[in-house]
Amino acid sequence: MQLILYSKPGCHLCEGLQEKLETIIQTGNIPSLKLEVRDITTCDDWFIAYEYEVPTLFYRSEDGSDLRPIPRPSPRITLQKFEQILKTYI
C-alpha cells in the first residue's frame, strides 16, 4: 500500500504531515504501508497542480491504476486519530 504526499521545501504543514506519516509507518499498525514524497518544485506538472494545495495526500489503489485523495488533516490532529482516518481510506 502506498501513500503519495505532494510537498515542497520550507512548507511547515508539509513537514508536519510527513513526520506524522513516517511515525505511523514506523509503528507498523498499518501493514506494508509505504510513503512516497513528491517535491512539487521538481516537476512543472506537479507545481501547476499543487502550488497552492500542499500538502496533498493520495493513496494508490492496490492495482496501481489510480490515485485516491485523502483529505488534509488538521495540523493539530493526534497520531492515533490520523491513523484511524487513514485506515478508513485505505
Image (cartoon, rainbow, N blue to C red):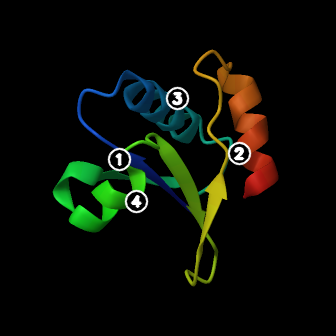
Q: CA distance from mark 3 to mark 4?
A: 24 Å
Image position, residue 81 (x, y; %): 76, 27
SS of the residue under disc 4:
helix
Q: In the rendered view, would you say 82 is above or below 2? A: above
Q: Are marks 3 and 2 in contact (CB under 8 Å)?
A: no
Residue beneath disc 4? 49
Tell me which residue sits at (43%, 41%) in the image: 54
* Front one among 69 and 50: 50
Q: Tag 3 or tag 1, which sits nearer the N-term?
A: 3
Which mark is on residue 86?
A: 2
Residue 48 in the figure: left or right of residue 44: right
SS of the residue under disc 2:
helix
Q: CA distance from mark 1 to mark 3?
A: 22 Å
Residue beneath disc 3? 20
Residue beneath disc 1? 51
SS of the residue under disc 3:
helix
Residue 55 in the figure: left or right of residue 84: left
Which mark is on residue 69?
A: none
Tell me which residue sits at (67%, 20%) in the image: 77
Q: Are marks 1 and 4 in contact (CB under 8 Å)?
A: yes
Image position, residue 20 (x, y; %): 52, 29
